[in-house]
Every structure is written in structure tokens, then in C-alpha cells.
Image (cartoon, rainbow, N blue to C red):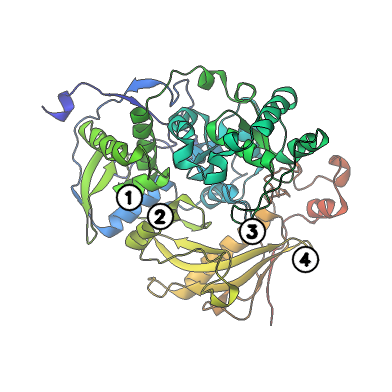
Amino acid sequence: MDVRSRPARPAVRGPPSGERADLTGSTATDVGGGGHHGTVTAATVVSTPVAPARARPDRLSRAQARRVALAAQGLHRARTGGSGPGLRQVTAVVRRLGLLQIDSVNVLARAHLMPAFSRLGPYDVGLLDRLSSRTPRRLVEAWAHEASFVPVETWPLLAWRRRAVRDHAWGSIASAAERHPAELAAVRAILAERGPVTSAQVHALLAEGGAGGRPATDEWGWNWSAAKRVLEHLFFTGEVVSAGRSAQFERRYDLPERVLPRSVLDAPPVTDAEAIRGLVEVGARAHGVATLRDLRDYFRLRRGVTNALVPAAVRELVEDGVLVPVEVEGLRGPWYLHRDAALPRRADGAALLSPFDPLVFERTRLEELFGTTYRIEIYVPAARRVHGYYVLPFLEGEHITARVDLKADRRAAGGGVLRVQSAHGEPAAPGDRGATAHRLAAELRAMAGWLGLADVVVAPAGTSLPSLRGRWAVADAGAPRWRRDVRHGRDDRFSQGRTRADVPGAGPRMAEGVTKGAAICRVRDMT
């Protein structure tokens, strides 16, 4: 039977993306355009339309595959200036990527805040807080690619994992209900009566009643109480959800009916097969072109029922014309091209990428497409690190041309410092290192301004890009300067031109950030 004449297969569609494009490189909507936000959700079983026949490549060069991947991630274009991205643009980035990984490391900025900066430039992080902690919520926390924010439409697609807690949660969390029945009953009562609450608040309430102690240290050396284990068990299974984060970035637990939109709560059940197909398609769209390994990795579809369901989902998506098998020059396959993937003629963007950015999730993929061997060295002893503690690859055009070890020193005198602990050019990267240093300096200035830091300081040692050293003024001194707590994702709600009196509760240092503005961002040589 011809694929185009095959009846549409019922499937679960993921959240709408911010861009639909074809392989001519033309696009209907820019990454900042927001995509559509209609009433169709990923929990609604719909027919996947079969795309009209059009010429498609059956082979891509490695450079073409790179550009397809960058376009899918919204990293192929230079960022535009203007008054700053708004809610629509930030929402479009999240929908394009499908998820934002959450991580506790806070040496620079919270991991989930960085991908939008890489794609949009300086933006108000309070927008992400608004999407995840205010009604109507557009983002919700879930176990996706590790702990992540996902569009609320994706929540039903993860029900199979919530049901399979014993296959997917780590030991003490999977067994918490059986091991701590008294705490389980007490925590449920507290959440019903007092939610949203943090784990510290729950622990304190249980301790008052004599049931909250029993600290345990057998999981990774963490001192987790029975209450915390029970909470994490309930969160993993979906009996409770996150209503947002506190100022200390603690999860605020509450019941789903008080957090999730009615359309999600009332959505019909999704079978495991439908859910896995939906997640695979979200990952395929975010990748542009991907291997089976890449598609498994995006939502960690590597065990339990996914072992059989992922290959089956890929076969169905190929049969329905959603994925097109292709070869990528010099790389083992098969590779699968999403039918909406764009192939730009060139990529001319520049961005610093968090260690938890979706473009670098899968290290083998990064090495195959970009020729970059990248490892997170956070847990490597300092003496054995090659590039540093918190190292960000620098994307320039379609290549990774450098990497920098960054630290936001918020306590430094004079308004804080973005410290470049080391900077290394990639040995095999094409182009001129002087030009790379110039573009990298611009990104460091932009990041320092976004973080509310006054200076960028480049260490004298540990750099193969000595031309980074120097002093530059911020290009656009008139741009709004949002001083925010990027450590926690909180918006302190004031911008350039507002005074301390305009901001209730603003301290002296916060006020300094307002009056100082963005006129100069100094880049100093430490020698």
C-alpha cells in the first residue's frame, strides 16, 4: 500500500512546536513567533495527518545534518536585538525543545534557565516562573529527561513512567510507600490540608507530631528523611505535583487537581504505546534528524516497556510519513529525519550552551555531528579536570569552536563578576581564533548583563584564547536591565530606571543594580 493512501493511524501528538519548516530552508514561523496555542493537547488522541508528497533527500552530508539539528533547536540564526523577548517567545522556545532539564548545580545559573538565554539572549527569567507556577500553568515538572519542566500537554504522555515507579525510580523512592506507611498517611493528610508545601515544611509538621524523623543516608550519601522519601515517591507516581519553586528553589508540593489545568486532568487515558509514540515524535521534532539512540535518550526511554515500544513507535512514524529514514555521510545509521525539519543553507548563530542544553544531551551525537568530545567534569576531582568545573561549549555558526569554564561570583565587590576560569579553543574548529574570541566576548558580555553582574574577569592562566583579555563596553546601554535572582529563577521585578523606592523589599545591592544600569560591563585581565 502506498504510504500516502494509508488510513491515518491514531496517535498522540506532542505540544505544538514554534516552527514548521520544510527542507528548502524556508520557515513559516520564527522561533520567537510563539507557535499556536490552541485547545488540542498532547493527551488528545488525534489522527496524524500524512504529509503531501514532496522531494526529500535520502542522504545528508554531515554538515547538512548539523544544520538540520541546529534549526530544529532554534540555534541556526543570529539573535535579533530589540526590547527583549516576551512570554510568547519564551513559550515558543520551550515548545520547540519539548523540555527543560532541572539541575541543582548553581555555579552560574539554574540549568533550566539557560536554554532560553542561548536562543533568545537576555530575557526576564520571571517569565519561566510565570509559566510554571501561576494559573493557567503552561509548564509542569516531571521526570522526563531526568527532572525537567515540560509543557502541560506532555504530562499525560509520561503516565506510563508514573505507573512503572519500580522500574524507573531509584530504590529508596520506589519502596518508600511500603517502608514508611505511617509517614505516607501523614504526608497525604498534610498535602490535602495545607498544600502547597515544601519538604522542609512537611518535615517540620511531621516532627511536631512525632513522625517526621528517621533520617537515612544510604542513597548517594544524602541525609534524606522518611518524609522526603515519601514526598519524592508521591511526586514520581503523580499523586502530588509541583506547584512551583520557593525562593530557595525548593519544590512546593500540592495535589494535581489544584495545579494542573482541567483539560489535562480530564484528558482520556493514554496507552503506553500511544504515549511512547508521542514522546518519540516530540524528541524527533526537537532533533530534526536523529538515530534510535538519540530518540531513546531525549525522554530516557531505555528500560521496561520502552525496550519494545520505542522501535515500534519509530516504525509506525516511518510508515505514517512522520519520520523519513536517511543516511548521514560517514556515520552509522539508520538516521530519521522529521518531516517538518528545516535544512538552512547556512547557520550563523552564536551561543554559549549549558552542560544541560538539549543540543548536548547525547554526547555521542555531539561528537558525531560536531566533532566535539564533551564531558561534564563537575564530579571529577579538581586535579584531574581537563577543562574545568562548569564548562559551556561555545557554538559559532555550525561548529563548536571553544569552551569556557564559568562562574557567577555574585558576592564580588562592585556588583558581582562573571569569572572565566578558563577558555579553550577547539583544536579542530575551523575559522580564525581571533574572530572566535571576539564573538565569544560578546556572548560573555550579554551573559554578564543578564545575570546582573557588573564585570567579566578572564583568568590569566588556563586559556588558549589570550585575545579574550581586554575591556569592552556593553553595546546597547539603553537596553532594559533586569536584575533578577537567576540562582532561583525568581524575578525581582525591576528594570533600568526604577529606584529602590519603586521596589518593595529591595535591598541596597539590588537598588545599586537599578541605578547603575547597563552602561559598562568591564572585562578585566587579572594579571
Q: Position of residue 467 (x, y in %)?
A: 56, 77
> Which residue in the protein does label 2 denote?
362
Q: Residue at point 33% right, 25% down?
A: 11
Could you tell whether 397 is left or right of 491 in the image? left
> Which residue in the protein does label 3 denote?
108
> Which residue in the protein does label 1 denote?
293
Question: Which of the two discs, 1 and 4, labels the residue nearer the N terminus?
Answer: 1
Mark nearest the camera among 4 and 2 is 2
Separation of disc 1 and disc 3 at Cα? 30 Å
Q: Residues within 10 Å of mark 2 (few under 14, many from 20)?
A: some
Q: Secondary structure at mark 3?
A: loop
Residue 49 lies in what quarter of the image? top left
Q: Position of residue 158 (x, y in %)?
A: 46, 33
Give the amino acid at mark 1.
Arg
Question: Which of the two discs, 3 and 2, labels the residue nearer the N terminus?
Answer: 3
Residue 179 lies in what quarter of the image? top right
Question: Which of the two discs, 1 and 2, labels the residue nearer the N terminus?
Answer: 1
Residue 419 lies in what quarter of the image? bottom right
Q: Residue at point 71% right, 59% down?
A: 453
Separation of disc 3 and disc 2 at Cα? 22 Å
Q: Is residue 45 above or below residue 445?
A: above
Are dots 1 and 2 in contact, CB under 8 Å? yes
Q: Is residue 445 above or below residue 325?
A: below
> Which residue in the protein does label 4 denote?
412
